[in-house]
Image: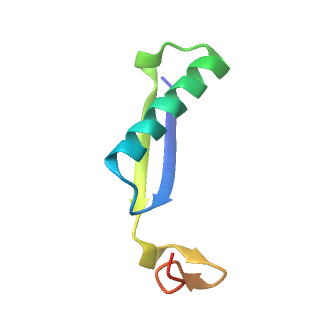
Amino acid sequence: MPLAEISMMEGRTEDQKRAVIAQVTQALVSAIGVPAETVRVVIREVPKANWGIGGVSAKDLGR
């Protein structure tokens, strides 16, 4: 059972997250030949204040 964990800043729509789940699942099916129903995808949404870029939070950078 492959598990893909994806961390991203908060703010994506439900539709965008559904697309990520579907496309990551398909990539694993294609790459390693597992059935789609065995693939697990976890999306971890990180608050922008907790995501640093070049020593500054993404929130402070206005991202």
Q: Residue at x 49, y 55 (%)?
A: 7
Say above or below: 59 vs 13: below
Say above or below: 38 vs 17: above
**Nearer to the camera, 25 or 61:** 61
Circle count: 0
**Residue extending furthest toward the left:** 14
Q: Residue at x 48, y 40 (%)?
A: 20
**Nearer to the camera, 42 or 19:** 19
Residue 44 x %, y %: 41, 54
Q: Residue at x 38, y 62 (%)?
A: 11
Residue 42 falls in which quadrant of the image? top left
Q: Residue at x 46, y 81 (%)?
A: 59
Residue 2 x %, y %: 52, 27
Its colouring scheme is rainbow
Residue 10 x %, y %: 40, 63
Say above or below: 7 vs 21: below
Residue 43 x %, y %: 42, 47
Say above or below: 50 vs 60: above
